[in-house]
Amino acid sequence: MHNIAIYDTTLRDGSQSEEIHLSTADKIRIACKLDDLGIGYIEGGWPGSNPTDMSFFKEIKNYELKTSKVAAFGSTHLANSSPETDKNLQSLIAARTEVITIFGKTWDIHVQEALRTTLDRNLEIIHNSLAFLRPQVAELFFDAEHFFDGFKANREFAMACLDRAVQAGADSIILCDTNGGTLPHEVGDIVAQVRKAFPHTVLGIHAHNDGELAVANSLQAVQNGVRHIQGTINGYGERCGNANLCSIIPNLEIKMDIPCLPQGCMAKLTNVSHVVSEIANVRSFHRQPFVGKSAFAHKGGVHVSAVQKNPKTYEHIPPALVGNKQRILLSDLAGQSNILFKAKRYGFDLDKNDPFVLELLSELKHRENRGYEFSAAEASFELLLNRVMGRSRDYFKIIAFRVFDTQRSEDDDPFTEATVMVKVGGMVEHTAATGMGPVNALDNALRKALQRFYPNIATMHLVDFKVRVLWDLKNDDGQFAGTASQVRVLIESRDQHTQWVTVGVHYNILEASRQALEDSINYKLFKDDQAKLTRALRDRDQ
Ligand SMILES: CC(=O)SCCNC(=O)CCNC(=O)[C@H](O)C(C)(C)COP(=O)(O)OP(=O)(O)OC[C@H]1O[C@@H](n2cnc3c(N)ncnc32)[C@H](O)[C@@H]1OP(=O)(O)O
Ligand SMILES: CC(=O)C(=O)O
């Protein structure tokens, strides 16, 4: 099998995603990441579209890319202009890239209704645009927009468009499933026919994901002779997105034995996926195949027991190949194997049937039954584990708390104040604080009370607060409770070193928040003590 050229269009089609807006600096950071991953081509944008894209092409020249060539994207010239006068073609040349890609219409309905011109004129437009660009650039690609729909509607015309592009000197012809609705068997069949008609031309595929088939369609195209694949990191793109390169690359390399990145680079894929989602400011999709946080996460006790004997039992590839890792989750579906795995991670070497394991498992299942979710709140689990093992200490105890929420007049914002009474060792501290809402006020009052005893809590702060109503849990009398339902609060906190999540559950949202806050502070104090202890032992042993 030949190598496949990977052509990334995250910066162009990816930025056509509804929620994504990339600045020039964002684009440069992503381009450097893609280059480091070993991507063959990076489509930087449409220079005739906006100043950001034009400034990207200017700025990227200051970077020495190791593996990637930069491509500028645009359309064939307008129906009522000529290549010499067309602004779009001029700005493609002005971008001074090694590669230019232009898209042209190949579906008759688009020519007649979107361009409002004749089929013959469209053939001229394709030919003239490419022939004009040919001497200006090292590599010239033609994206045959809507090719699969065009082929099904009017085979002769769609093929004539490709023929004109080849005659005008295009190096690769990319067949686009622009509306993303073509099925894999249709892609295979049509690509095979094009392959036969153009045996000496490099063919490519650009698939959209409207039928959730973009990855499958791209692989099917490769099976039928395509040697160039376009796609985006995390599948970002117009509407439902593009073919996801984070799935295509490992499928090609691992399952189909077709190299497409420099040796060893595929292990960077998970990191690239996460960094790009950070830069694009889009939350990572946990269930994303290969690179998602849950891609190799095991929750069911049966699965956990088996993967510890041999990961192959429930993992389709070794996660390290794509830079991901196995995770073992905790929940009411856990068996002893889950507990043993986690306990080991936190420094306890326990055996199956150890009474501590059974106690922990029963406590875990009991709490999960009441709505706690430890797979999302590992810090609360670590505290519970250490409590059961007798290794934690009570840093403080909240004896009482009160929260007042008042609105003094119709136009005023609500005013919130919390008071807390905490016991630290033999001392009782009583404080009050205001806040932006009840949980913030409680957090502020608690910190104020504890600061004198534990100054290190000043370095932690709350980064996320999630409340979920547990509608499906029944009350003690077996009834669903409506607005008196249990709620689960998850609090994410961080300090200068790390980030952790704690959980609280109650029918009263403040009490649930109090539990999660208390665990969060306890975890910080426990973690700092552990670090101090480790340092002391290390100093002693030196
Ligand atoms: C399938 C794809 O994803 S293609 C990429 C789509 N991406 C984008 O559109 C993002 C960048 N686009 C832009 O910034 C703007 O649309 C521009 C600058 C390119 C053009 O802006 P405007 O001149 O205001 O035109 P507008 O966006 O309203 O309409 C597009 C024009 O291009 C024409 N056009 C569309 N495709 C082609 C083509 N392949 N060849 C020639 N002309 C084309 C349309 O007919 C329309 O012209 P008309 O108004 O004379 O009918
Ligand atoms: C070119 C392109 O983005 C498409 O046809 O979808």
Image (cartoon, grey):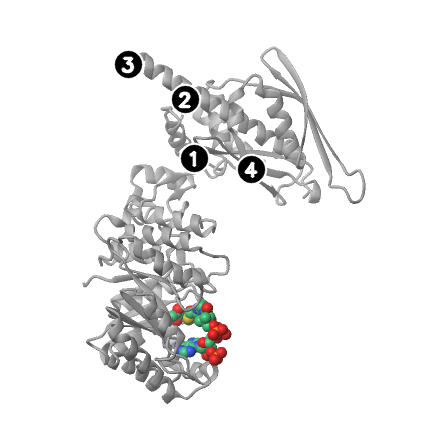
User: Closer to the N terminus: mark 4 or mark 2?
Assistant: 4
Q: Mark number for residue 531?
A: 2
Residue tagged by mark 1? 335
User: Could you tell me which quadrant the N terminus lies in?
Assistant: bottom left
Residue ranking furthest to the top: 426
Q: Amino acid at mark 4?
A: Leu
Of circles 4 and 1, the one toward us is 4
User: Closer to the N terminus: mark 1 or mark 2?
Assistant: 1
Residue tagged by mark 3? 542
Residue at image x 35%, y 63%? Answer: 216
Q: Amino acid at mark 3?
A: Gln
Residue at image x 24%, y 53%? Answer: 66
Of 370 and 191, nearer the camera is 191
Q: CA distance from mark 1 to mark 3?
A: 41 Å
Q: Position of residue 374 (x, y in %)?
A: 50, 35
Q: Secondary structure at mark 4?
A: strand
Q: Are discs 3 and 4 less than 8 Å apart at CB?
A: no
Q: Are discs 4 and 2 less than 8 Å apart at CB?
A: no
Of circles 3 and 4, the one toward us is 3
